[in-house]
Amino acid sequence: MKNLVCVGSLLFFVSFISGCGPKESDIDRIQWFTMGTIAAVQSTDSDTLPKARDVSQTIYEAIEKRFSAWNDASELAVVNASAGNGKPCAVSDEFFTLATNAWAFCRASDGAFNPLVGSIMKVWGFNGAKTVLHLPTSEALEQAVALADWHKVVWTNQTVLLPDPGMKLDFGAIAKGYAVDVVFEKLRSAGYTNLLVDLGGNLRATGEAAPRRGGWRVGIRDPFKKYGILATFLLKPGEATATSGNYERFVTIEGQRYAHIMDARHAMPVRGMAGVTVVAPTALLADGLSTTLFVLGPNAGAKLLKNYPGCDAVWIPDASGKVILLATANMAKRINPIGKTDFTLSVVNP
Ligand code: AMP
Ligand code: MG
């Protein structure tokens, strides 16, 4: 499969939809598994791809080593293990940088984005926690809410203090976007042009997929089908996109599926939303916002986006019947339906 590729089950790159672009066979893609997902680099200049892959993978490995919620030796795990011991825990500059970004999303969204979501993930059986057979009790949920009180965390630029035992940082909502930006900057400054970087559907591109195309055409996945896209939009040079979906990771408890994005105010998985795709000037912004907007939903989400210039979003509610796309005005203008896809597109005004 060379050119229409399912990336991390989130977004599809679709270069076959083109007025004047290269033929399907002109764009090459190398993909591999890393950071728990599929990574890829794509370009019409296939000779450059092996090196781009190596550069990317070195960066992904280093970032995973620091921020993995699964690896007991990661810096994140060491910090989380210090919770409740009363002593500030030393953190690296990179850790502090990512945490600063996480706290910015958290404050901006009044805790809809919550980097202390780790204890809630555990209660629901995510991130390597024991499989949960029965719904968590109200006491367990209350305790998880208390452990997600991000106001209590004390940061200096070299240390963090997690005051309560059991508090857990989790940067799963932004680490991949951050990683894509690091790779993007590295490859761009090394002279790569017309290259698409993809980490599990977190995409950022230099240049364009073909002369005069004006960017890279990407597809919004149909969250109700295993494969298939609903629509496409053009990712302009330098722009990034990310998708949060309820179909990516989930647990099944007592016959019901619960997805991995939490409303930390109630320690409950968000219901009613199938997917949110964000376009932003950086992959970190796209990733952080896609999770935040998944929790907030379209009305509060569109209001929040007023504070983020250059960022737009489309929400797909989890409902039966005809698929509904709710998009900010700019996003609605960019969305192109494809083939026989059948959905309703409405604009959400802030
Ligand atoms: P994404 O796929 O980028 O939306 O990130 C989802 C991941 O972010 C989850 O697997 C958790 O690790 C983490 N997460 C879940 N809920 C939240 C939340 N409300 N705020 C911040 N991170 C979250
Ligand atoms: Mg995210």
Image (tube, helix red, strand yellow):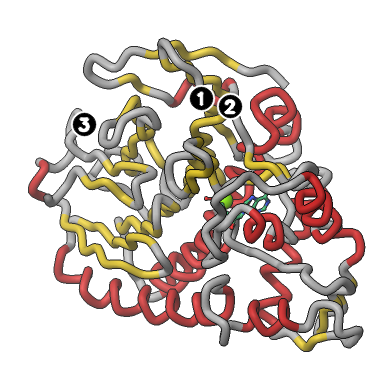
Q: Which three-letter amino acid code belongs to the residue tagged 1?
A: Asp
The disc at residue 318 is 1
Q: Which three-letter amino acid code belongs to the residue tagged 3?
A: Ile
In the rendered image of this protein, does residue 334 appear above or below residue 95? above
Q: Which residue is label 2 attached to? A: 272
Question: Can residue 63 be seen by looking at this rendering?
Answer: no
Residue at 48% x, 44% y: name it. Answer: 252
- Whole-angstrom CA distance, mark 3 to mark 2, is 31 Å
Are the residues flagged by discs 1 and 3 in contact, CB closer than 8 Å?
Answer: no
User: 307 and 146: which one is in front?
Assistant: 146
- Whole-angstrom CA distance, mark 1 to mark 2, is 5 Å
Could you say where residue 193 lies in the image, as x and y percent from the top left? 32, 61
Point out the frontmost of discs 1 and 3.
1
Q: Secondary structure at mark 1?
A: loop
Residue at 37% x, 28% y: name it. Answer: 224
The disc at residue 17 is 3
